[in-house]
Image: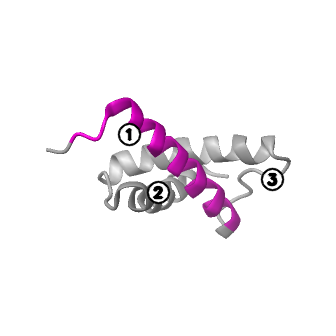
Amino acid sequence: MSLFGWIILGIIAGWIGSHIVDNGGKGPLLDMVLGIVGALVGGEIFSALGAHAITGLNLYSLFVAVIGSVVVLVIYHAAMGRRRL
């Protein structure tokens, strides 16, 4: 998948994952970073379970990336705490 595809998938997955975990986005840059990291984590989780990892810019890959971004966000919140400004 191209760099542009990873960025688009990361932004969408990070945004969706942020809304699932804490009902609000973290901003486009952090959503993108957490989404890309989440896509990698989701790919590893699905590979460990015997399923396909990220296969391209499609709905299945988005599902994998969102699952991964939720996992990353839960870990992020546990490490950073739930501080609100």
Q: CA distance from mark 3 to mark 1?
A: 28 Å
In depth, the one of 81 and 41 nearer the eye is: 81
Looking at the rendered structure, the kind of residue marked 2 is Gly
Q: CA distance from mark 3 to mark 2?
A: 20 Å
Residue 29: image x %, image y %?
Answer: 34, 47
Query: Residue furthest toward the top?
Result: 79
Disc 1 target residue: 77
In depth, the one of 83 and 29 nearer the eye is: 83
Looking at the rendered structure, the kind of residue marked 3 is His
Q: Residue at x 65, y 69 (%)?
A: 59
Q: Residue at x 28, y 41 (%)?
A: 82
Query: Residue furthest toward the bottom?
Result: 59
| Label whose residue precedes the other's in the sequence (2 or 1) | 2
Q: How many marks?
A: 3
> For residue 17, which numbered disc appears in the image?
2
> For residue 52, which numbered disc appears in the image?
3
Q: Which region shows up in magenta?
A: 60-83
Mark 3 burial class by Cα count in 10 Å: few <14, some 14-19, many 20+: some
Tag nearer the camera, 3 or 2:
2
